[in-house]
Amino acid sequence: MKVAVPVTCVPDNLGAEPKYPDTDEAVRASPGPGDLLQLLAAGRLLRKQRAAEVEPVIRACRPPDPG
């Protein structure tokens, strides 16, 4: 008898989500516009890097398009 075994398509080497510097608390505590922009820019850079790691995994996990 064959039994289906679920298998993850997420590779073991995909790291954890980073700690983003632009948290609500950090944004509220920002002393000025320059500091706020630096926080937001750093958060954006990390999110872009994370998306570059995660998006290929998502594409690989999706079943082929039948159409």
Image (cartoon, helix red, strand yellow):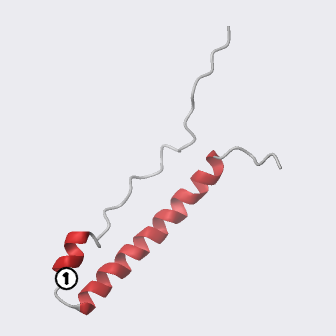
In the figure, 52 relative to 3: above or below?
below
Residue at 63% over, 21% down:
4
| Circle 1: residue type | Ser
> Please, what secondary structure does the residue beneath circle 1 have?
loop
| Image quadrant assignment for residue 8 | top right
* Front residue of this view, candidates 11 and 34: 34
Residue at 42% over, 52% down:
15
Estimate the x, y position of residue 49 in percent, counting from the top left.
Answer: 47, 68
In the figure, 67 relative to 38: above or below?
above
In the figure, 61 relative to 27: above or below?
above
Residue at 59% over, 52% down:
58
* Front residue of this view, candidates 27 and 54: 27
Residue with the mark numbered 1: 30
Q: Residues within 10 Å of mark 1 (few under 14, many from 20)?
A: some
Is 49 positioned to the left or the right of 18 in the image?
A: right
| Image quadrant assignment for residue 28 | bottom left
